[in-house]
Image: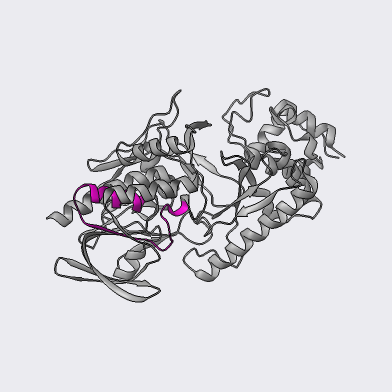
Amino acid sequence: MTCDVLVLGAGSAGLAAAVTAARQGASVILVERHGFAGGMGTASLVHTFCGLYLLDGDQPVLANPGFPAEMEERMRLATGSGPAKMGRVWVLPQHPVEFVRIADALIKESGVQVLYHTEALAARREGDTWHIDLAGRGGIFSIATKSVVDASGDAVFAAIAGAATATTDAATLQRPAYVFAIQGASEGESGLALAGRIVDGVRRGLLSKDSLGLHFRSSGRAGETFGTIDLSGTEDGGYDPLNPACLSALEIAGRGIAATAIDFLKQEAAGWSSAYISQWPVRVGVRESRRWIGRHILTAEEVLAGTRHADDIALATWPLEFRETNRGPKLRYPENGLAAGIPLGSLIPRDLERVFVAGRCLSCDHGAQASIRVMGTCFATGQAAGAAAAQAAAL
Amino acid sequence: MITAPTPEDVIEMLREEGIADLPAGFPAEGDLFAAGMDSMAVMQLIVVAEERFGAVIAPQDAGRENLGTPLDLAALIGRRMA
């Protein structure tokens, strides 16, 4: 198999990259480990698009044109819900099921060839061509491509191509979130009263302290509610989001906290007696893991100063949202309220040709990653990486 | 003997514990929820109020009328101290 652009990962960034490159005339293969696109927004049930809009203001203003704006419009049409202001930020509620449908339509319309149920294993460069070994259940096969976009979230291509990466120390890495869906509690106790109920359960020893971060929000669909737990990440010793044993412990811990809490609320919370867990996530919601080292390393200081660069390709509008503990977010806003630019140099690896990076693993430091990791920004960096990869393939 | 907190004590506690990032000069009757306190932060708040003041805040106490401002919150903690 051959193509102009191979995109690794069909999350927010990879979907944007693949669709953008295909619309520019490139032949595109999109490689994804799950059976659907959307990444954290589908497999991990993260149900809010952050980073789509500028900070503050009386009305929501889209920060980045093109693919992010198109996704915003399609999601609004699909859910019937518009943006909401939470403190100083505007967000768009999104539904994972609708996200999958929108992604299927975009892939079909743009002519992207998608390979679900596929993982990348190895990469080597010969002349102007990258040869990438991929694995499906039928065995290992190879694709030759002119350029590559790594939107894997974990800098997988850097690892298999032997490029430089950076990883935050285990104690400081952003903690993971565990999101699940429940039915039958939408008319029951909610909000602050439910928060008080959960603390009461912890106080009485019926719930573990890990339950203290558990909160609920309506999915926007009749009868359906999403529950979200911030995990400590130390369920199995040190937190390592690239280690399957660690991730496995997190999945089990998340399910355990959720199931115990729902059993408790069924007994004690008004209107919860018929509630049940209706959906587990395919995977725990990892916020941060391995990052690329690119020509430019975007820093927290740049984001907080609203810094612009000559080669900016998108705006980072989300505050630095630190989740270094599981006791709620700590937000840091730019001093002047202005959005910083994300330069193309943060999408280009320092030492590789015809490789571009998008999404949460682009080249930045831990603090800047706390802003640029959100899905609305991933749509924008994915779009830019897809366009750059299509142009490089045409050279 | 622990004494009941003043609204100023409550503001300091919310800042120290990272429950709400309140600006300098935040008023005793300021809206804590408008300042970013959410249901997750309220869970922390209930735990911290018990640790610091021995005040047991029950599920039925957890409403905006009791938690909405430093003034209301100081009064609630005072009422619930053992």
Q: Describe the colour scheme in one phrase.
A: one colour
Image coordinates for residue A43, horizontal then vertical, percent: 49, 55
- Answer with the quarter of the image where residue A114 lies: bottom left
Q: The C terminus of chain A lies in which quarter of the figure?
A: bottom left
Looking at the image, which is closer to me, A200 or A338? A200
Magenta stretch: residue A282 in it?
Answer: no
Magenta stretch: residue A17 in it?
Answer: yes
- Answer with the quarter of the image where residue A246 lies: bottom right
In the figure, A83 relative to A102: above or below?
above
Residue beneath the point at 43% across and 32% down: A55
Q: The N terminus of chain A lies in which quarter of the figure?
A: bottom left
Image coordinates for residue A212, horizontal then vertical, percent: 68, 49
Residue beneath the point at 50% across and 69% down: A244
As drawn, is A90 to the left or to the right of A3?
right
As drawn, is B27 to the left or to the right of A112?
right
Q: Residue furthest left?
A: A395
Residue B68 is at least partly visible in this image: yes
As drawn, is A33 to the left or to the right of A284?
left
Residue A162 is at least partly visible in this image: no
Image coordinates for residue B34, horizontal then vertical, percent: 59, 28
In the figure, A116 relative to A382: above or below?
below
As drawn, is A75 to the left or to the right of B70?
left
Stretch in magenta: A13-40
Q: Residue furthest right?
A: B82
